[in-house]
Structures are given as C-alpha cells and as structure tokens.
Image: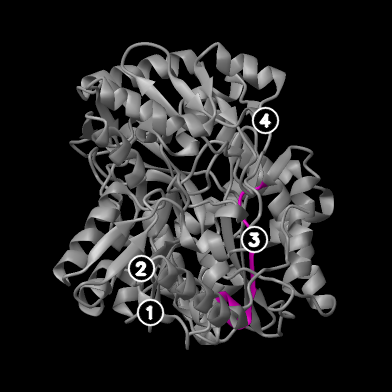
C-alpha cells in the first residue's frame, strides 16, 4: 500500500519540544525563531527530514508556520485547517492564528518587544517572505536574524536522513517535447528577461524541464534538486549523484553539467562574482540564494519562474495522456463506488478499510505508479475537516444515515488524477441534501462556464459560491488548483480562487471542487478535473469563448440531489454528464459494475 495510516503526530510532545527549542535559542542569544512548513525548495511537498513544523507542533497540514518566542508561541494556519490544528496541536503551547487574517508578519509587529532578535533559516523562507518578516520586526524595533544552521535541527535528535529516491527518465512519448527543446525555449525566456541565468528551485519545474521524474517525496514523483539555466550555454543541475541510475545519468549528462547540491551556493557566488544578472523568482526562492548572488557582487533580477507557465499549458501528448489516465482511473473508481454501495449496506466499514480498498482497485489497473496524495477518507463529522487525513487513532467506523467523503487520486505515467465524491450512507437528512445540491450548483456553474481569453480564476471563483452565498453559506478553500502531468497534483500558476490572478489558457488543467462543511456533522465536496478548451464561437455570439472539458468520469450521487433546486440547464448538464460517464466508462468495467453504473447514471 502506498498510503500509511501510522502517524508521528502526538500533541503531548509539543510542550517538551518547544521548551527544548527555547533553551537552544537562549544559548544562541535569540529571543524567538520562525518555523515554516517548508524546505529549501519552497514547495508544498516535503520529505520527513524537512517536516520541522510537524515535529515541533504536531500539525500535519500542507501550509503553516510557528513562531516561538521566549514566553509565548503561535501557529498560523489557513481556513482549511482551523479544525485540524486544534486536534493535532497542544493549543496551550501554540496559540492558533489565522494565516490570512493575522499573518505572521502582522503578529510579529504587534507582539515582539523592541530590541528582540528573532531568528530565521534563510533557506526556508522566500525572498519576498523574508522581506515582509524583516519589515515587521523592524516596525516593532526588533531584528530578524539569519542563522547559518537551524537551531531546531540541533534539538531534533531523531531527524530522518535526507531522501535518495531514484531518478528515472520520463519518456518523450508522454512528455510530448524533448528536454533539449524545452531547455532552448526556456533559455530564450531567460534572455528575454535580460538575465544571464535563472535559478530553478522547484523540483517539479526541474523534472519537467529535463524530462525526469524522482521519488524523494511521498506520492509525487519529484527529484529534489536545483538547477541554473543560463541564457546561453549548458545548464547545471545540482542533485545527489546517488539518486541517478546509469540511464538517468547519461540522459542528464547529454543536457547539463551535473553537480552535487553542496555546489549550488559556490556556483551562485561565482555567477555573482562575474557581475552576472541572475534571475530569481522571489516567491519561490529561498532568501539564502538571493543573498549568495548579491553578496558576491551579482545583480538579482526578480521574475516569475518561466517554466511554471510552460509546464501548466499541456501539449497534445500530455492532454492525450490525461484523457487516457482519467478513463483508466474512472473505471477503477466506478468499481470502487459499486463495491462501496454494497459493502456499506452489509455491515461495519471504517475509513481505513475504504481507503485501502480504493487503492487496491487502482493498483489492479497495472499502471498505478503511486497515489497522488493520501486519500481523504472521511466519515460523518470527519468530513467537516477539509483536509482530514485518517490514521489508526482517528479511524472512524462509517455511521448509518450519514455522508461519506472520499477525495483521492492516482499517479500514472501518462497523467495525474484527483477526484472527490460525497456519498449517501443510508438516509440523508434534508439539510444534507440541500447542502449537497447547493454545492452541485456551484460545480455545474464552473463546468458550464464560457469566458473570454484573459479571464483569471479569481474572476470565475464566485460562480462556484453564488448558490451557497444566497443561502448564507461558503467554504474556506479555493475552488480549484492546477494539476501536473505525472507530477504535482497541486500545480501553479493557475487556480480558481479569490487569489487566482493568472489567466486561464487552453491546455491548462484545473480542479473544480466547491464544498460545504458543517463542523461536527458532515462535509461535502464534488471534484472533477477540467481541461481548459480552446476559444470557440457560441451560436449568436460575437466573441470566441474558452470553456472546460471534464476529464474526470464518475457518477455524482443522485440520491443527494434535490431536483427541484436545479434549473433546467443544470438538470440537463447533470444528465448529459452521467450519460457520458456511462458511455465512456461502461465498456471498461465488469458486467456487475456496469449494471450498477446504469442505475446510478439514470436521468434525474
């Protein structure tokens, strides 16, 4: 099994670990320290050796920060984790704060005393993030102090070793473009930005650029590494040679100079010393890298990682792969749904058993490389925890007359999947059905949207919420995120969210996942992945409009739909989507599953 249900989370350890860190800070003459949920690559996915925030506090979410002062400490999380943080963290030690409403910089400016020295690890904070924190400390009359070695590591006695996952070559048939052509294209982008070189810090950008995949973090095929891409000449990739096979080493040596990770800072200093203009993405690059260039006399040019957008716009081979992966995954998921309906009616079933069974159906395809994230297998009130992760202590038996939420996905060499369905267990209440139908209306609004070129995800986000808003309800997460091609299940720069300011382009893949969560009762989310389709004319219209093609193919539980709450157009979409699910998935499943599928995709 790819998913583990064991956990290192133990809120009772927070007090002792915080005290040990405070002792170490005092020894170093520091009055406080910042502990982000980040590694030197600034990505969402970190290996166990970099899970400092989780080790210190117990919080296992994908975003957050702790601030430890001599007499108080706080942990900052966003709206997805307001319930989870109180279950995983000793809040008598770390006071929960809202990451968006009261960000760490604001809290520091209001809390730290004049003259205080607040430490931070400049590898783990972005250039822009460190600047905001330094300004906040200055506003309070305090000082933000960069440390050469992380004091938390000094008290983390059983810290795991850094990963050495094997690097493989991603075939051109799936990549759709040779690595040499990508490098040439991105080098031209660096030159256009009037830079001599660009520093790549995000492993998914490096994986895409060099057509490689890795296995350094769980569920996402990332090779933890750095790279320097010059406007002219050969790139350099900084990666532990022990990760390379003969095949992947030969592949990389044909494209770039291979160095160890320890050579990165000297290489940046060498560039700086030559007076080079070095381009860094200030939102994704550790402050330590910018300082290495500037201290050596180089000129730092700030700009967005050019690979990020290129990677987001899928080419024809990647789009074909995504469609094939979703057909395969859809058949496995429909087999799972049919099994679930029968198994939950027969007797006791718990969250772990469900997650394991779903993974087994995906594994039976013979093409599963990994699951794309830990499945959110959430029964009853656990589904109200937006990013709930079941473990052996939290594992809940699915109660009767409740809702069950399953959010999961697979990693296949031809594509990455992510799907959420909310399922009725027994008799759902009218409130549950009303909430489900409101969420469904938001999902349909995104699925059927047509919009002109240049439209951002932020401009579409309200479509997913308007039905909920009219009922006085909302959800505290974005409506959708980008998805990679056998890469990260969460990929930028595109997203459908209040903060999604990047224009959507044909070939981008985004999720469509509005939800609703009632604390202590139930949670609802309906998620499909959508491919942005090229602009086309609408009959009677004057301008071509982009749209969406649903890649995900699996039934939406019609038992939870209040048909009289849907418009005629919404009902038509619902029935047409189900007709497509039956037509495309029906031939791929066994006879018993097909009979079940025919029933659950019948018109409303």
Task: Tell me, for residue 30, which label it has, or none.
Answer: 2
The residue carrying pointer 4 sits among few (fewer than 14), some (14 to 19) or many (20 or more) residues within 10 Å by Cα, namely few
**Which residue does the numbered mark 3 point to in the structure image?**
375
Residue depicted at x 71% and y 40%: 369
Q: Of the residues under marks 2 and 3, which one precedes in the sequence? A: 2
Of the numbered discs 3 and 4, the one sitting upstream in the chain is: 4
User: Which mark is nearer the camera, 2 or 3?
Assistant: 2
Q: Can residue 580 be seen in this view?
A: yes
For the residue carrying disc 1, how many other residues have a C-alpha within 10 Å: few (<14), some (14-19), or many (20+)? Answer: some
> Does 579 sit left or right of 32 as displayed?
right
SS category of the residue bearing label 1:
loop
Q: Circle 2 sits in a helix, a strand or a loop, which is it?
A: loop
Asked if residue 375 is among those painted magenta in the image, a careful observer would answer yes
- The residue depicted at 58 percent of the width and 70 percent of the height is 388
In this rendering, does residue 523 appear at all?
no
Q: Quick one: 422 or 381, which is closer to the camera?
A: 381
Q: Nearer the viewer, residue 295 or 217?
A: 295
- Residue 4: give x, y in percent of width and height: 73, 60
State the separation of the CA atoms marked 3 and 1: 38 Å
Residue beneath disc 1: 70
* Residue numbers of the magenta segment: 371-383
Where residue 541 appears, as percent x and y from the top left, is 21, 39
Mark nearer the N terminus (2 vs 1): 2
Mark 2: give few (<14), some (14-19) or many (20+) Cα within 10 Å: many
């Amino acid at each position: 099994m790819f998913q583990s249900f064991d956990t290192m989370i133990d809120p009772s350890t927070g007090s002792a670990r915080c005290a040990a860190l405070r002792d170490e800070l005092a020894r170093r003459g520091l009055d406080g320290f910042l502990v982000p949920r980040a590694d030197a690559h600034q990505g969402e996915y970190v290996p166990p050796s970099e899970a400092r925030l989780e080790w210190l506090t117990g919080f296992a979410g994908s975003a957050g920060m702790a601030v430890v002062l001599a007499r108080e400490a706080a942990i900052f999380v966003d709206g997805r984790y307001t319930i989870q943080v109180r279950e995983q963290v000793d809040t008598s030690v770390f006071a929960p704060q809202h990451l968006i409403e009261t960000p760490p910089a604001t809290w520091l400016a209001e809390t730290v005393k004049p003259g205080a020295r607040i430490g931070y690890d400049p590898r783990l904070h972005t250039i822009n993030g460190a600047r905001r924190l330094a300004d906040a400390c200055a506003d309070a009359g305090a000082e933000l102090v960069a440390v050469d070695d992380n004091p938390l590591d000094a008290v983390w006695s059983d810290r795991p070793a850094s990963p050495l996952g094997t690097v493989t070559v991603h075939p051109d048939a799936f990549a759709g473009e040779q690595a040499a052509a990508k490098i040439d294209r991105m080098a031209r982008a660096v030159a256009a930005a009037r830079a001599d070189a660009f520093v790549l810090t995000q492993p998914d950008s490096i994986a895409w650029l060099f057509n490689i995949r890795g296995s350094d973090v769980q569920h996402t095929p990332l090779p933890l590494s750095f790279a320097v891409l010059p406007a002219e000449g050969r790139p350099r990739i900084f990666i532990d040679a022990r990760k390379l096979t003969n095949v992947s080493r030969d592949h990389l040596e044909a494209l770039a100079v291979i160095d160890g990770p320890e050579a990165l800072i000297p290489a940046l200093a060498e560039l700086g010393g030559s007076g080079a203009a070095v381009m860094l993405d200030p939102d994704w690059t550790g402050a330590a890298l910018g300082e290495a260039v500037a201290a050596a006399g180089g000129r730092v040019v700030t700009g967005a990682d050019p690979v990020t957008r290129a990677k987001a716009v899928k080419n024809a081979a990647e789009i074909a792969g995504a469609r094939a992966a979703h057909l395969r995954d859809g058949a496995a998921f429909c087999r799972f749904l049919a099994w679930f309906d029968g198994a939950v009616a027969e007797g006791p079933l718990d969250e772990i058993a469900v997650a394991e069974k779903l993974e087994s159906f995906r594994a039976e395809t013979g093409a599963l490389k990994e699951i794309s994230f830990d499945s959110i297998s959430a029964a009853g009130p656990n589904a109200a925890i937006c990013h709930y992760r079941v473990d052996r202590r939290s594992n809940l038996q699915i109660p009767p007359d409740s809702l069950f939420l399953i959010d999961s996905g697979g990693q296949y060499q031809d594509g990455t999947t992510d799907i959420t369905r909310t399922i009725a267990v027994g008799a759902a209440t009218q409130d549950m059905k009303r909430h489900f139908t409101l969420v469904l209306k938001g999902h349909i609004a995104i699925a059927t949207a047509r919009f002109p070129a240049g439209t951002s995800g932020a401009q579409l986000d309200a479509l997913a919420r308007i039905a909920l808003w009219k009922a006085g309800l909302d959800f505290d997460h974005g409506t959708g995120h980008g998805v990679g091609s056998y890469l990260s299940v969460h990929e930028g720069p595109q997203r459908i969210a209040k903060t999604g300011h990047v224009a959507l382009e044909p070939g981008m893949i985004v999720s469509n996942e509005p939800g609703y969560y009632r604390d202590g009762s139930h949670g609802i989310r309906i998620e499909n992945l959508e491919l942005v389709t090229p602009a086309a004319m609408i009959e009677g219209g004057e301008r071509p409009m982009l749209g969406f093609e649903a890649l995900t193919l699996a039934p939406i539980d019609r038992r939870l739909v209040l048909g009289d709450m849907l418009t005629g157009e919404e009902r038509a979409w619902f029935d047409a989507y189900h007709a497509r699910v039956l037509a495309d998935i029906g031939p791929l499943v066994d006879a018993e599953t097909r009979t079940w599928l025919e029933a659950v995709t019948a018109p409303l």
